[in-house]
Image (cartoon, rainbow, N blue to C red):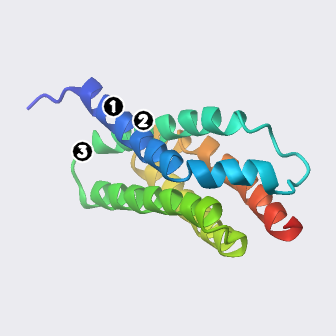
Amino acid sequence: MKRNHWKVFIVSVVLAEAVGALSGWLTRDGAQQYAQSIVLPPLSPPGIVFPIVWTVLFALMGIGSAIVWLAPDSQARSGELRLYAVQLAFNFVWSLIFFNWKNYGFAFVWLAALWVLIGWMILRFRALVPAAGWTQVPYFLWVAFAGYLNLGVWLLN
């Protein structure tokens, strides 16, 4: 049975973007308060950078998951897709912890766990389809930078 590859890519990217959009919508008030009242660490980018970068990263997450989805059916493929879902859930919850609950210390620990999950996902994606792993490297690097920012916010506030 021939798969419509472009449909898989569209659905995967839309799903990832929807998770990001819902997270942004649920944390919009907390993010606005954050922008007005928090002492930021050095190297903090302007607020407009975050939605742009996250839109690109969620698209790359969707592309990577689509590549894995289109790989031959196997136990490994199923495991990689479960790991993808877990890290996506961790990503979603981090925003709530950080912006809505303002628990910067716990958010930092949560983000460190997310970073480990992303690293693990990259290794597993790359073992199955190398291109899928490479699509996640910018995400891994950005979350490392987000960890620096989260730690800075925690220490300065």
Instruction: Tell me which corner region of the image, top left, top right, bottom left or bottom right, holds residue 56.
Output: top right
- Mark 2 vs 1: CB contact within 8 A: yes
35 vs 92, nearest the viewer: 35
- Quadrant hosting residue 52: top right
Q: Is residue 76 left or right of residue 139?
A: left
Pair 3/2: label in front: 2
Element on which disc 1 rests? helix
Report helix, strand or loop for mark 2. Answer: helix
Q: Where residue 83 sits: x, y (%)?
A: 40, 61
Query: 8 above or below 126?
Result: above
Q: Amino acid at mark 3?
A: Pro
Q: Nearer the viewer, residue 146 or 115?
A: 146
The three-letter code of the residue at mark 1 reads Phe
> 10 Å neighbourhood of mark 1: few (<14), some, or many (≥20)?
many
Q: Spatial distance from mark 1 to mark 3, Cα to Cα?
A: 16 Å
> Could you say where residue 32 lies in the image, as x and y percent from the top left?
67, 47
What crowding class fits label 3: few (fewer than 14 Cα within 10 Å), some (14-19), or many (20 or more)?
few
Q: Which mark is residue 72?
A: 3
Query: Which residue does the numbered mark 1 point to in the structure image?
Result: 9
> Which label's residue is closer to the chain start, 1 or 3?
1
**Horizontal side, residue 83 vs residue 53: left or right:** left
Nearer-the-camera pick, 71 or 35: 35
126 with respect to 140 (left or right): left
Looking at the picture, does residue 70 appear above or below residue 120?
above
* Residue 48, image x, y percentages: 70, 33
| Vertical relation: 85 (above or below) 137 | below
Tell me which amino acid carries mark 2: Ile
Residue indicated by mark 2: 63
Q: Which residue in the rendered view is the most extreme toward the left?
A: 1
Residue lying at 41% horizontally and 43% vertically, measured from the top left = 16
Front-lying residue, 34 or 154: 34
